[in-house]
Amino acid sequence: MSDINTVVLSGRLTADPKLHYVKKGNEQVPVCNFSIASEDKYGRTSFIPVIVWRNYGESVANYIEKGQEVIISGSIYSRHDAKTGRTFIELHANEVKYGNKAGVNHDHV
């Protein structure tokens, strides 16, 4: 049996998403990066970095903005930076559902 690595988080974007391209072989692959602030039931806020790859990343970058509510499903990945000795945790999103934009308050996302 393989391990399960599926996460669903909701929160608000901490800044506008950043779209850039990385070289993979002979192609330039779109990558959308952003972070969300997600609050637990005790009022503690976690700031989670999110990555959305390829064409879906381009699409997501065009539709979300700082302060907007989102629900994200995907997988957690870790990477180690040999220079600093730090380990980073990232959510690689498979799906991003868009909710209310900043300043709009409704009861649903």
Image (cartoon, rainbow, N blue to C red):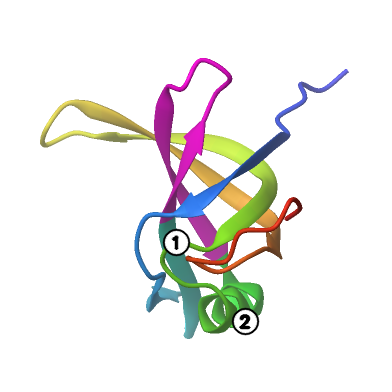
Image height of 42 relative to 105, above or below = above
Which x, y percent locates residue 87?
30, 28
- Residue shown at the point (57%, 35%) measured from the top left: 76
Give the number of the disc on residue 59. Answer: 2
- 46 shown above or below 12: above
| Badge 2 amino acid | Ser
As drawn, the residue found furthest toward the right would be 1
Magenta residues, start to end: 35-52
| Residue 52 position within the rendered picture, expressed as x and y whole percent measured from the top left | 56, 63
The answer to whether the residue labelled 1 contacts the one labelled 2, judged by CB atoms less than 8 Å apart, is: no
Q: Which residue bears the numbered disc 1? A: 67
91 relative to 67 in the view: left or right: right
Q: Residue at x 58, y 19 (%)?
A: 41
Q: Is residue 85 left or right of residue 31?
A: left
* Quarter residue 54 falls in: bottom right
Q: Quadrant of the C terminus?
A: bottom right
* Label 1 vs 2, first from the N-terminus: 2
Question: Judging from the image, what secondary structure is the residue with disc 2 in?
Answer: helix
Query: Is residue 79 toward the left or the right of residue 29 in the image?
Result: left
Q: Does residue 42 belong to the magenta stretch?
A: yes
Q: Position of residue 4 (x, y in %)?
A: 77, 25
Task: Say whether residue 25 is visible.
Answer: no
Is residue 24 on the magenta stretch? no
The 10 Å Cα crowd at callout 1, few under 14, some 14 to 19, many 20 or more, is some
Q: Could you tell me which quadrant the N terminus lies in?
A: top right
Q: Position of residue 57 (x, y in %)?
A: 57, 73
